[in-house]
């Protein structure tokens, strides 16, 4: 009963930012009675974390995503309502170093359990690029590459950790969480096998992408050249573009990839200047209107298809 009331409360909150201040107090009052209401909510900071949390939680918890569909997650700003969600959540799943606003808000507001992906999965340093420039010393990401979800096996590790933490919070359903994480791992291991197999013998190994979101694909022999370095919206300098054009000609690269959630203008111009193909590779940082019926697995498979085509695999 309380659960139902709280969910309606949350829906009303979501619909009107203006009411957030008023409705917050109501929300807090409802969550005071222990395990009902907000006692069943998980907050995930962005889509791949939401996907893992939903798969592992099954029907036992509701999962909210701080990054709305169609929103670019790197420079997310939080609304008052979302800060309140962080406070009320039993479990918050975020990745320190990826979204500065979320890092600060979790630190200040999370009162439940917190899973920091950076503590759980083995993050790797940014891959080296052809031009040898240090592009990743900025404070947004630090030295480790946060885009771990391009490696399905690291997603499986996150699933196991979430299962363990949910089992602590809700021991009656611990076996379900463990089984859900095992099923997720099986799906992810299959996906990993498809990537290994699909990219094992290609005519080329370099891909040109918009921003540096695909470093974890180096495990499959892929080498990356990002147009705009780390930040999805950054404009490359003419000198950077010149270097990239030379490299594309030298390596007979067939395709320049832009990405969802960011304007394809630079990638499209580069491709048309060189008379090669422009295509879209999804960094899977979030869903959009066009991909709202997809999920992590289907988007990863669609990327694999495009990579295979571009590199002659
Ligand atoms: Zn990114």
Image (cartoon, grey):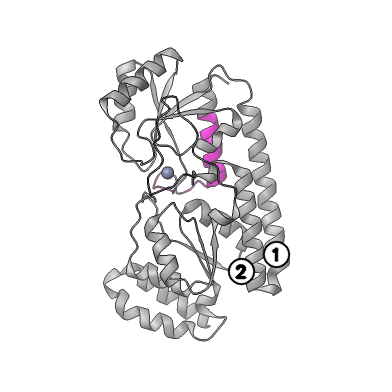
Q: Are marks 2 and 1 in contact (CB under 8 Å)?
A: yes
Tell me the residue at 52%/73% (across/down). Answer: 112
Tell me the residue at 41%/40% (across/down). Answer: 136
Whole-percent x, y for residue 7 in the image: 46, 74
How many numbered callouts? Answer: 2
Tell me the residue at 61%/33% (across/down). Answer: 195
Separation (CA) of disc 2 from disc 1: 9 Å
Q: Which mark is residue 7?
A: none
Q: In the displayed structure, would residue 180 be above or below residue 267?
A: below
Classify the position of ligand 1 by quadrant: top left, top right, bottom left or bottom right. Answer: top left
Asked if residue 54 lies left or right of residue 81, the reply is right
- Residue 68 visible? The answer is no
Disc 2 marks which residue? Answer: 60
The boundaries of the magenta stretch are 287-306
Q: Which mark is residue 176?
A: 1
Q: In the displayed structure, would residue 79 be above or below residue 87?
A: above
Q: In the displayed structure, would residue 59 be above or below residue 192?
A: below
């Amino acid at each position: 009963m309380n659960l139902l009331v709280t969910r309606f409360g949350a829906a009303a909150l979501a619909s009107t930012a203006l009411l957030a201040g008023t409705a917050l107090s109501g929300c807090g009052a409802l969550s005071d009675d222990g395990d009902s209401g907000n006692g069943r909510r998980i907050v995930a900071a962005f889509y791949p974390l939401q996907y893992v949390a939903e798969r592992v939680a099954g029907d036992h918890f509701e999962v909210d995503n701080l990054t709305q569909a169609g929103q670019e997650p790197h420079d997310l700003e939080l609304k008052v309502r979302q800060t309140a969600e962080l406070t009320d959540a039993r479990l918050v799943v975020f990745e320190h170093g990826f979204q500065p606003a979320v890092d600060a808000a979790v630190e200040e507001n999370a009162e439940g359990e917190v899973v920091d992906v950076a503590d759980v999965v083995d993050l790797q340093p940014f891959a080296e690029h052809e031009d040898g420039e240090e592009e990743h010393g900025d404070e947004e990401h630090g030295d480790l590459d946060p885009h771990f979800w391009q490696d399905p096996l690291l997603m499986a590790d996150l699933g196991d950790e979430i299962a363990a933490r949910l089992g602590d919070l809700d021991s009656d359903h611990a076996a379900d969480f463990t089984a859900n994480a095992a099923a997720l791992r099986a799906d992810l291991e299959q996906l990993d096998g498809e990537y290994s197999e699909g990219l094992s013998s290609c005519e080329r190994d370099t891909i040109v992408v918009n921003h540096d979101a695909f470093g974890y694909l180096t495990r499959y022999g892929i080498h990356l050249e990002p147009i705009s370095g780390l930040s999805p919206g950054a404009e490359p300098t003419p000198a950077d573009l010149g270097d990239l054009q030379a490299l594309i000609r030298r390596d007979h690269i067939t395709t320049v990839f832009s990405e969802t959630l960011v304007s394809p203008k630079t990638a499209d111009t580069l491709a048309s200047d060189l008379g090669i193909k422009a295509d879209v590779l999804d960094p899977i940082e979030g869903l959009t209107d066009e991909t709202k019926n997809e999920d992590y697995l289907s988007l990863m498979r669609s990327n694999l298809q495009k990579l295979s085509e571009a590199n002659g695999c």
